[in-house]
Image: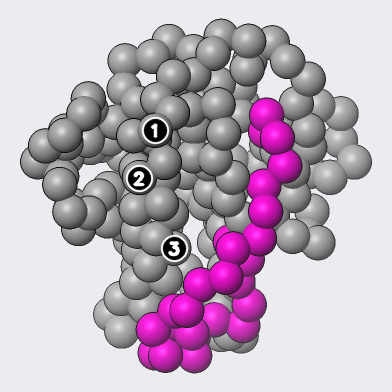
Amino acid sequence: MSKPLRFLVAVAAFVAGAWVTRQGIDWLRREPSVSSKVVQQPWVTQSFDAGDYVFEVPWSLQPTSLNFPPAAAKAMASWTVLTHEADGMNIMAMHITLVPGKSGNLEGAADGSVNNMRTVPGTVSVNGSKHPTTVLGQPGYDVEARIERDRGGPLQLYSVVFGQGSDLYQVQFIAVADQPAAQATWKKLRDSFRVRGAKA
């Protein structure tokens, strides 16, 4: 993939993640705790869009409108961004389809999950890492980052990005750090990806 296209895909992931991150941090200041009941309660099946991939979440995610930079938008045939925040968590899901003949940059999207945190006002430090993985038979990266803030306690980000060819999928989870209930919630979500119609 060319350097310009690597940049465009990273920008797309960056813009979506940065917007949701800012919204999530503002909201988490007001409602920081994740209840252990979240993992035990009935969850709902969530799709990225009309495609084949689904996953489980505590509550339905809602479409979010974003204005991508013109150069990035020109490289994308379609995109979907879904978010919801409740119970001390902010969850975002994104699916980008590039124009025919283009392919995504998974590593750039994974790095963007961490790098966008550094652009949020009030961030003191970000300690993140990524590890190669496979999701539904497709290559991807698991991402974790601890975000130290100048006000309030630290935040924890978990993210997974995967895809193949022209399609890139990402799910991002943010909560106040050092909460076992938040870790358990992310693990349940992360383990729930499946093809539509398959048993959970």
Q: Quadrant of the C terminus?
A: top right
Q: Measure how far apart labels 2 and 1 are at the Cα level.
A: 7 Å
Q: Is residue 58 above or below residue 5?
A: above
Residue indicated by mark 1:
30
Of 49 and 103, nearer the camera is 49
Of 169 and 67, nearer the camera is 67
Q: Measure how far apart labels 2 and 3 are at the Cα level.
A: 16 Å
Identify the image quadrant of residue 70.
bottom left
Q: Is residue 126 magenta?
A: no
Tell me where residue 193 appears, x and y as whole percent.
68, 36
Q: Which numbered mark, 2 or 3, is in the foreground of this view?
A: 2
Tell me where residue 116 appears, x and y as whole percent.
27, 56
Specify the segment rendered in magenta: 57-81
Of 97 and 16, nearer the camera is 16
Tell me where residue 111 appears, x and y as whole percent.
29, 53
Residue indicated by mark 2:
26
* Residue 2 relative to residue 153: left or right: right
Instruction: Give the amino acid at mark 3.
Output: Ala
Residue indicated by mark 3:
16
Q: Earlier in the sequence, mark 3 or mark 1?
A: 3
